[in-house]
């Protein structure tokens, strides 16, 4: 009986610890409501967990401050070959559709010691880039596979969960299939 009580107590302690870790991560990411995503599940069609990009030039861009925009949050690294191939395509698509309400936020998984290389890769890109600072991106989880991207529609709902794509790298066809219909929708 005492063992069961201890196990139950541990479970609630673990739950409290998990909730506290989640709340701390959300606070670091600038999120307003960590408990809204406490279960850690991303759901297409549900409110997208917030993200804040701290750009290389020191600005902060929060997804929650982009209502009415279609947002692609892309995670990459300088040492990732498929990422380096994807970035110019994504930048060209951004330049082409920026006037239609597209925003792209580039989160580099590189560490501060790689900042010169990140700046070099980011220089020709048309969208803002910053260092993620950790492999964890709040409710989006630990970024363990790159490139990976998440797309948020004009209403702030998760429209595409990169974890569910067998081949998550952007291609022209995938951008046409996933993002263009969201841009065509003017519902804010």
Image (spheres, rainbow, N blue to C red):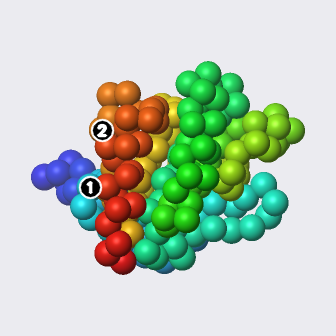
Q: What is the number of the mark on residue 12?
A: none
x and y, in percent, of residue 95 in the image: 61, 52
Q: Is residue 156 left or right of residue 108?
A: left
* Quadrant assignment, res 89: top right
x and y, in percent, of residue 144 in the image: 49, 34
Report the residue marked by disc 1.
44
Q: Earlier in the sequence, mark 2 or mark 1?
A: 1
**Most foreground residue, 23 or 131:** 131
Q: Residue at x 54, y 76 (%)?
A: 65
The relative height of residue 68 versus residue 171 in the rendered view (above or below) is below
Q: Residue furthest left?
A: 1
x and y, in percent, of residue 47 in the image: 32, 68
Q: Is residue 71 left or right of residue 39?
A: right
Q: Residue at x 22, y 56 (%)?
A: 8
- Is residue 97 visible in the rendered image? The answer is yes
**Most foreground residue, 113 or 87:** 87
Report the residue marked by disc 2.
164
x and y, in percent, of residue 122 in the image: 74, 43
Q: Is residue 35 left or right of residue 130?
A: left
Near mark 2 (Cα within 10 A), the count class, few <14, some 14-19 or many ≥20, is: few
Q: Is residue 65 left or right of residue 159?
A: right
Q: How many marks?
A: 2
Tell me how far mark 2 sits from mark 1, CA to CA. Answer: 10 Å
- Is residue 112 visible in the rendered image? The answer is no
Circles 2 and 1: CB distance less than 8 Å?
yes
């Amino acid at each position: 009986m005492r063992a069961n009580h201890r196990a139950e107590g541990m479970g609630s302690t673990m739950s409290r610890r998990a909730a506290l870790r989640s709340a701390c991560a959300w606070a670091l990411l600038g999120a307003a409501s960590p408990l809204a995503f406490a279960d850690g599940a991303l759901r297409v069609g549900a409110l997208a967990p917030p993200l804040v990009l701290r750009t290389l030039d020191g600005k902060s861009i929060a997804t929650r401050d982009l209502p009415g925009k279609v947002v692609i949050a892309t995670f990459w690294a300088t040492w990732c070959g498929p990422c380096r191939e994807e970035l110019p395509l994504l930048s060209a698509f951004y330049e082409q559709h920026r006037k239609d309400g597209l925003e792209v936020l580039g989160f580099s998984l590189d560490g501060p010691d790689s900042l010169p290389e990140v700046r070099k890769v980011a220089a020709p890109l048309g969208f803002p880039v910053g260092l993620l600072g950790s492999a964890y991106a709040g409710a989006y989880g630990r970024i363990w596979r790159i490139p990976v991207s998440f797309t948020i529609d004009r209403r702030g709902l998760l429209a595409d969960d990169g974890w569910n794509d067998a081949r998550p790298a952007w291609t022209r066809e995938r951008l046409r299939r996933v993002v263009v219909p969201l841009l065509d929708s003017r519902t804010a």
